[in-house]
Image: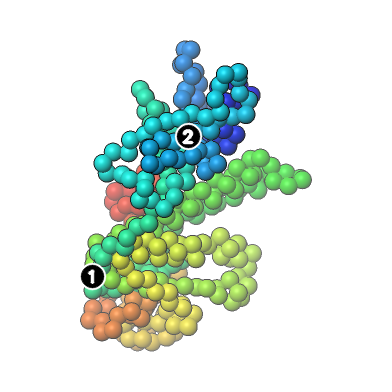
Amino acid sequence: MKNQPCWRDLNAQSSQAIVEELAGAFQSWFEQDNSDANPPGYRKHGEERPRSTITFKEDGFKLDIKHQQVRLSKGKNLKDGWSDFILCEYDTGPDADLGAVEDVQQVRIVWTGDHWELHFVCKVAIDAADSSGEKTAGVDLGICNTAAVSVGDETLLYPGNALKEDSHYFRQEEYDTEGENGPSTHAEWARQKKSRRQTHYLHALSKDIVEQCADRGVETIAVGHPKDIRADEDWGRHGNKRLHDWAFDTLIQHIEYKAEERGIEVERVDEYELATSITCCACGMKADSNRVERGLYVCENCELVANSDLNAAENMRATVTLSPSEDRSNGCLAQPSVRLFDKSTGRVAPQEQVCP
């Protein structure tokens, strides 16, 4: 395909990016067991070829901000009389200024249906907006429930069902097609697909957590950091595998930089040192027996009934709350608002908006 005339005169990285996108789309279509599914829309319509987005990376373009021109490099297989680049003039409009960005990382040519547009992918320094308030929040991270958030008088629960489903499906696809001499092409595809979907999920989740905290006027977020959990003990073959796949550090980093953009401070809390999972957030009693079941916490001393992850989140919130005045009795800690990842939209939404 790269030897076709319409591809051969592109920059090498640009043609490679189109081939990879096209190959990935067709491979995904051929692998699915659905006779009603339509193939990717890369076919010719009569004599008209489809117009793919063309990406020029840093070595494929040269930007002249002063004269508002960009030079796009072409390929090496040039015909007589052809230049080795395309010179384009651009107009960013009144709301954008390329001179104000730190770096232009890519230039993309996008077909809109009747004309071509230049899209500049830029690295931009964002001034932290002070949208914080006086409230505090605690965040407990986990595997079954990816996150539990307590803001004192409100609690939010983020089940990890979507992430676990993807992990199970693509890992099975990877194992079933593993080659004798290393990963097969399909196994490598499954591994990369799983990684991309997990990355998107963590970005969507961290964005929603920070937005929910900002909407409630949160000034400081305390996030549990189970930094030594993988070295504590042997959790068995399945347990060790789940811990290995648990990207808690990545999720914390996403929360930190997204919160910084909102002017919200994030503090990491050592879960092991404070024993947040076995400590009652109402009376402070510590007992392993208080965790009656995986998701249920019942205090033998004060009879608090709570979701165990939210109890831990409230313990973390207490570390950044100087004089907590909230009533930690039964209520929101036992019946949180549930927010689910919607695969159809790729966003996090309240449970009633996701479930039919």
- The type of residue carrying mark 2 is Arg
Which disc number belongs to residue 93? none
Instruction: Identify the element where label 2 is drawn.
Output: strand
* Count of marks placed on residues: 2
- On the question of residue 183 being in view, the answer is yes
Mark 1–mark 2 contact, CB under 8 Å?
no
User: x, y percentage for residue 45?
Assistant: 46, 16
* Colour scheme shown: rainbow
Which disc number belongs to residue 71? 2
Quadrant of the rendering where the N terminus is positioned = top right
User: x, y percentage for residue 103?
Assistant: 44, 50
Q: Earlier in the sequence, mark 1 or mark 2?
A: 2
Q: Residue at x 45, y 69 (%)?
A: 294
Where 103 sits versus 142, above or below? above
Give the camera-side residue of 14 and 80.
80
Q: Residue at x 60, y 74 (%)?
A: 231
Give the camera-side residue of 144 and 23.
23
Which disc number belongs to residue 133? 1
User: Quick one: label 2, few (<14), some, or many (20+) residues within 10 Å?
Assistant: some
Where 121 sits versus 116, above or below? below
- On the question of residue 296 being in view, the answer is no
For this view, does 113 lie left or right of residue 82?
A: left
